[in-house]
Amino acid sequence: MNCRTRILHAAPGSPILRVYCDDKLIQSKVSYKDLTNYCLVDSGHKHFKVFPERKQHVPLIEAYSHLLDSACHTIVLTGRPSELSLFVVPDARIPKTDRAYLRFVNLVPDTNLDFTFSQGAFIQVNDIRFKEVTDYYPATPGTYTIRVYLAGTNHLLLTIPSFTLRRGRAYTIYIHGLRDDYHAPIDYLFCADGDEY
């Protein structure tokens, strides 16, 4: 059986990368902040290796994970260069519905985050830890502004203005970067999830 995977490089300070699954190349030339298109890979228990694009002798990281049959996944590379990690985020397959769905992923090391967003009703998501993936929240289709705070404070880290959610679609906002490095400031990636992305 097959599944669909894409790669997100959210590891500030790490080089351009090549990603292998069971010793087969699945993506090359993946730069920081890149999100690749989905590609087909075999499902099941998988062995991932990540190499620098130009030095393919010793992997930067190896990891094992399970990919579900006929599903979509985002393979996330994150962390500081000395603490690089890889984990797999299952992407939603949304049934026909009049709602949109939105979730959040914190990829900022050593930092917990709060999120607020509103369109009519005010929604707050609190104390999201590094590498935590929230559930999908149902939302009315429309245009939103999201604010990202240092958890438990009024310290605003990021504003994400005027993005649109369409009915019957699932979306993820990935927050990445470093609080203490102006070369890789905290930023976001807003993406649609699933087969029709």
Image: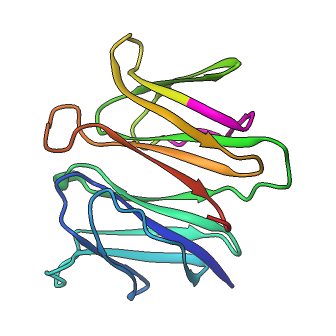
- Residue found at x 28% / y 49%: 79
Residue 11 magenta-drawn? Answer: no
Q: Position of residue 162 (x, y in %)?
A: 52, 34
Q: Is residue 35 left or right of residue 14?
A: right
Q: Position of residue 45 (x, y in %)?
A: 55, 75
- Residue found at x 21% / y 49%: 80
Which image quadrant for residue 47?
A: bottom left
Q: Position of residue 135 (x, y in %)?
A: 64, 40
Which image quadrant for residue 81?
A: bottom left
Give the residue furthest to the top.
154
Magenta residues span 133-144
Tell me the quadrant of the picture where the C terminus can be found: bottom right
Residue 142 magenta-drawn? Answer: yes
- Residue found at x 65% / y 70%: 68
Asked if 11 appears above or below 175 in the picture, the reply is below
Asked if 53 appears above or below 187 in the picture, the reply is below
Q: Is residue 165 left or right of residue 181?
A: right
Q: What's the coloring here?
A: rainbow
Q: Is residue 112 left or right of residue 57?
A: right
Asked if 23 appears above or below 182 in the picture, the reply is below
Task: Give the camera-side residue of 70 and 149.
Answer: 149
Tell me the quadrant of the picture where the N terminus can be found: bottom right
Q: How many marks?
A: 0
